């Protein structure tokens, strides 16, 4: 394979000035896989920006956790996300981020998370009741419906069912930006390309939903302790401007459901492709729950369900890479990368690295029973260090409860087993086409 040198580091060949831009825009997953063949720190460039892909778990740990002070999320991530999320918890940095994280953390305390259990199983039960045995469903849309309702009921204290279709369409409009695989897609979001105009329409629709939720709550926010009320009161007391209230609510509405919805979609897909695992899951649920929805006290007994979720997020991490920017020269994998260098840290590739996983392409939940000595950061679907996902425990519990509730009634089969699952990489990696599945009564 042709290669390019950055000092002693080698990466895939690009063209003058634009570097690897075309390869990246055409097929980011294929491009990352090509990069991974060059080593643990691989230089490449998109536009005029120099990137390094970081593949070794020890380096991942240093960037995200032990040496996180030498990195920030940086301009690259902001260009991708700011126009939707503004400066919410996911995108802000420094003191602003720290202050927000402290304000919001109480909504994710272990006691609070436990109090969301019934909401999670109720919303999953509603899905069971909506479906007809033998009638195909688009499982990705169904999981979005379940997770967005769970999010709104638990964190915003409100039912959002009437807005689910608007949110779904808005997400498709925003996501269309990453479907534009031409150079045009790499233009800044303020240039009025057709994709940017469509994405703007999506953002306006989400803003409309947020405005409605705030207007409905403003009258009785005092005395309630959900996140929506907490933020409205903080705004009223002059602690946060209106813009931050909006940014925070959009961040939680979107980051709080899209990822878990994908994790569940891929889990159903993998179970359908691996009937032995599906049978073991059903057997565990039957033995432990006996037809009742799972409760908090059941979760420690659902160990196979837990491994299924873990393994699914290894093979299909909904967030397939995180990015950082070095704020000073740093040594990675024995090489010094310059201040300002952009780092791509791909869960997708690290999770499928043969050095840490036997038969990495295989779905094997039981690989999580052995006492493997694989490095800590060979698995990081929720990121790591101080910017680790604030919703990690919420999401893992939600995935198990939804799976455990639905799989007691239905066995899900692929409507078109001959079709491959193609992914559409944006900020998250969603399925390129609807994933049709047929629920069969058990
Ligand atoms: C399977 C589900 C989920 C996955 C795979 C996931 C993944 C991630 C990852 C990888 C990050 C770190 C990003 C980075 O370091 O640049 C992150 C951060 C974040 N996630 Fe999640 N997430 C999930 C569920 C949730 C849920 C349920 C919520 C909220 C209810 C949430 C809210 C957030 C927020 C606000 C941040 C930013 C945290 C900070 O920087 O302080 N996520 N998530």
Image (cartoon, rainbow, N blue to C red):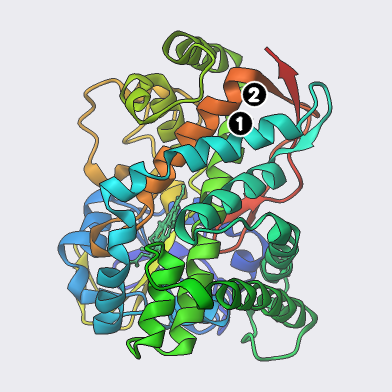
Q: In the rendered view, does 11 fall on the left or right side of 425? A: left
308 lies above or below 186? above
Q: Residues within 10 Å of mark 1 (few under 14, many from 20)?
A: many
Identify the residue shown where x is 41% and y is 41%. Answer: 396
Q: Nearer the viewer, residue 360 or 120?
A: 120
Quadrant location of the C terminus?
A: top right
View extreme (right): residue: 135
Q: Secondary structure at mark 2?
A: helix
Q: CA distance from mark 2 to mark 1?
A: 6 Å
Quarter residue 336 falls in = bottom left
Label 1 near ligand 1 (CB < 8 Å)? no
Q: Residues within 10 Å of mark 2 (few under 14, many from 20)?
A: some
Q: In the rendered view, does 329 fall on the left or right side of 428? A: left
Q: Quadrant of ligand 1?
A: bottom left
Percent from the top left, x then y, of residue 150?
A: 54, 49
Q: In the rendered view, does 370 fall on the left or right side of 195? A: left
Q: From the image, tell me which residue sits under label 1.
A: 268
Percent from the top left, x then y, of residue 70?
A: 20, 75
Identify the residue shown where x is 46% and y is 80%. Answer: 245
Identify the residue shown where x is 70% and y is 81%. Answer: 200
Q: From the image, tell me which residue sits under label 2.
A: 272
160 lies above or below 111? below
Quarter residue 106 falls in = bottom left
View extreme (left): residue: 66
55 lies above or below 79? above
Q: Secondary structure at mark 1?
A: helix
């Amino acid at each position: 394979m042709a290669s390019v040198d950055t000092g002693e580091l080698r990466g895939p060949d690009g063209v003058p000035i634009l570097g690897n831009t075309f390869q990246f825009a055409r097929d980011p997953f294929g491009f990352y896989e090509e990069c991974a063949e060059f080593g643990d720190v691989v230089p490449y460039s998109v536009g005029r920006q120099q990137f390094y892909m970081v593949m070794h778990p020890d380096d991942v740990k240093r960037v995200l956790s032990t040496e996180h002070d030498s990195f920030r999320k940086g301009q690259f991530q902001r260009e991708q996300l700011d126009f939707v999320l503004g400066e919410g918890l996911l995108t802000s940095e420094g003191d602003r981020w720290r202050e927000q994280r402290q304000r919001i953390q109480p909504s994710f305390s272990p006691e609070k998370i436990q109090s969301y259990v019934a909401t999670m199983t109720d919303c999953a039960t509603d899905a069971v009741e909506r479906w007809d045995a033998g009638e195909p469903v688009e499982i990705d849309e169904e999981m979005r419906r379940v997770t967005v309702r769970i999010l709104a009921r638990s964190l915003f204290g409100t039912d959002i069912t009437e807005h689910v279709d608007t949110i779904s369409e808005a997400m498709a409009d925003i996501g269309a930006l990453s479907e534009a695989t031409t150079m045009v897609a790499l233009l800044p979001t303020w240039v009025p390309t057709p994709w940017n105009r469509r994405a703007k329409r999506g953002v306006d629709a989400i803003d409309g939903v947020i405005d409605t939720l705030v207007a409905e709550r403003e009258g009785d926010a005092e005395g309630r302790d959900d996140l929506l009320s907490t933020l409205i009161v903080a705004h009223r007391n002059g602690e946060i401007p209106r813009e931050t209230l909006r940014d925070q609510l959009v961040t939680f509405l979107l980051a709080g459901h899209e990822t878990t919805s994908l994790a569940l979609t891929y889990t159903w897909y993998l179970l359908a492709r691996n009937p032995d695992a599906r049978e073991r899951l059903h057997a565990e649920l039957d033995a432990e729950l006996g037809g009742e929805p799972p409760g908090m006290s059941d979760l420690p007994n659902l160990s196979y369900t837990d491994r299924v979720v873990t393994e699914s997020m290894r093979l299909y991490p909904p967030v397939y890479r995180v990015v950082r920017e070095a704020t000073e020269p740093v040594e990675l994998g024995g090489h010094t990368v310059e201040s300002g260098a952009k780092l791509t840290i791909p869960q997708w590739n690290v999770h499928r690295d043969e050095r840490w996983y036997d038969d990495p392409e295989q779905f094997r939940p039981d690989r999580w029973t052995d006492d493997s000595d694989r490095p800590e950061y060979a698995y990081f679907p929720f990121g790591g260090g101080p910017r680790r996902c604030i919703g990690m425990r919420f999401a893992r519990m939600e995935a198990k409860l939804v799976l455990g509730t639905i799989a007691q009634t239905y066995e899900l089969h692929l409507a078109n087993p001959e079709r491959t699952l193609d992914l559409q990489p944006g900020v998250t990696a969603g399925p390129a086409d609807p994933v049709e599945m047929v629920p069969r009564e058990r």
